[in-house]
Image (cartoon, rainbow, N blue to C red):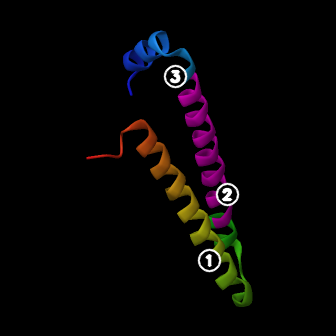
Amino acid sequence: MGIIGFLKTLTNHKSDAISELGELGELELKVLEAKKDWQAAQKVCDEVTDPKHLDNAILKAVRAERKYMHYLKLVKQSTGKGTS
């Protein structure tokens, strides 16, 4: 939804638009948090020197990446940018 569409929706259906904005805001915060977690997990992978801990660090990084991609997908779907 573009800014013009959002403003039209806001004037026509204020409560619906505000709830949509709140939902997107929460999702966007989750995306940012997941991205930060992913970057931190990648940093740990880069810094691990003990082979015993490397597998665990890699699994955490993969899990964090999947979480980030999941939230990105949800944001794209809710804004209509991810549909063909």
Q: Nearer the viewer, residue 14 or 47?
A: 14
C-alpha span from label 1 to label 2: 13 Å
Residue name at image x 58 percent, y 35 percent? 23
Q: Position of residue 75 (x, y in %)?
A: 48, 43
Instruction: Check disc 2 and report the residue beneath it.
Output: 37
The amino acid pointed to by label 3 is Ala
Instruction: Kindly report the secondary structure that dominates the magenta region of the rendered protein.
Output: helix
For residue 59, which quarter of the picture?
bottom right
Task: Tell whether label 2 touches label 1 (CB within 8 Å).
Answer: no
What is the span of residues highlighted in magenta in the rendered image?
A: 18-41
* Number of marks present in the image shown: 3
Task: Tell whether label 2 touches label 3 (CB within 8 Å).
Answer: no
Instruction: Check disc 3 and report the residue beneath it.
Output: 17
Q: Position of residue 81 (x, y in %)?
A: 36, 40
The amino acid pointed to by label 2 is Asp
Q: Going from the N terminus, do you reach mark 3 or mark 1 first?
A: 3
Residue 2, numbered label: none
